[in-house]
Image (cartoon, rainbow, N blue to C red):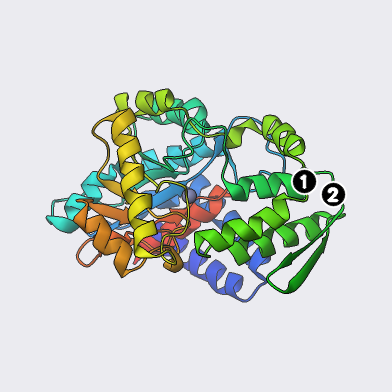
Amino acid sequence: MLRRKLFSAVSWRAESRATGLSIEDGQLLRERCGRMMAWGRAHDCLPDIEHRAAILCFHNVVDHRPDPEVEADVLHVDRFRGLLRVLRRSFNVVSLAEIVAAVRDRAPLPPRAIAITFDDGYVTNHTVAAPVLDEFHMPWSSFLPAKLVDSAGRQWIDDLYLLIHRGSRRRIEFRWDDREFAFDLDTAVGRREAVFTIREACRYLPETLRQERMSRVFGLYSRDELETLRDRFRDFAPLTWSQARALQAGGVDVGSHSLSHIALGPQPAEVIRHELTAARALLRKHLGDHSPHFSYPYGRQASFSPETERQLIAMGYHCAVTLEQAAIDCRNQNLLQLPRLIVSPHTGRILFGLWQRFIR
Ligand SMILES: [Zn+2]
């Protein structure tokens, strides 16, 4: 109890200091505080609040030193293991289905329940993450953008990172609608700004417009250049169906992350229907019976709508997960908008965030 009070005081002080700093400095402080708390086993003394749960969202876990620019968001396997050790010691890792049952049927859930999910179906789900999760005997879910599985394709955002950060151009200029855009790519700051601006201007667009805009950017590079970069960064490749089947056979809950990984909210109803039904048809064809859980691409408010919820319910899905950064209150939770916490490469931040969300 004394330890809980002590760590609580430290964490609230850190949080109030962090909110007064720049975003980057604030995150650095939370990261350091979270790692210190893990080292001091702070999470062991969290209270037993039974209606509180959280779902973590992972993407790419790799076992090599990531290229700091292109792979700024991928998690190293050593840090992944470190985080799982804290989860094993201080939390109860449950399946997503158990959280659904706790919300829907008021089924009992252990205190400090955490579910593990992976989005985007990277090959590293199978090659890096799965063996570690097996070793820890932890249940998890993997959400696949069905059309990308077993294809030579990649997510357009990953290709954008490769081209802007490691492509040959030092400057790019293009027109969208009637506006001129120009970015100097000589410095890492300039490259980051280009990726950020292009990504944010495109990801929540109707699909036809997004494709048109992206063709202006991708058209500045040759196909060969993109293929060479893809070859150099193989961890962004998708799983094969045979790997997805192996995951499912090993007990992983394998579900849909739409057909082509587009934000569903802004799309017309027939595009949403196609994204959902064609994805399910592919999953059925290759996996047979699969997960009744769905994950919205990009996961923020603009990724879903009353129409996506209506269609998911009509198709019999049990839940849909977002990336709204919150914990779950099982007594009062829309199952078609289950929030998840994104795990960044800085795992101290998620440990800090988990403490803050489970302490009250
Ligand atoms: Zn995704």
Image quarter hosting the N terminus: bottom left
Image quarter hosting the C terminus: bottom left
**Residue 174 sits in which quadrant?**
bottom right
Residue beneath disc 1: 221
Looking at this view, is 148 or 10 the one in front?
A: 148
Indicate the position of residue 144 as horizontal and vertical percent values.
41, 41
The residue under the point 37% across, 23% down is: 246
Hey, what amino acid is under mark 2?
Answer: Arg
Measure how far apart labels 1 and 2 are at the Cα level: 8 Å
356 in relation to 178, above or below: above
Indicate the position of residue 257 as horizontal and vertical percent values.
40, 47
Hey, what amino acid is under mark 1?
Answer: Tyr
Residue 64 shows up from this direction: yes
Residue 50 shows up from this direction: no
Q: Is 334 on the left-hand or right-hand side of 77?
A: left
The residue under the point 36% across, 43% down is: 279
Q: Earlier in the sequence, mark 1 or mark 2?
A: 2
Q: Is 207 on the left-hand or right-hand side of 50?
A: right
Residue beneath disc 2: 169
Asked if ligand 1 lies within 8 A of label 2, the reply is: no
Is the Cβ of the residue at disc 1 closer than 8 Å to that at disc 2?
yes
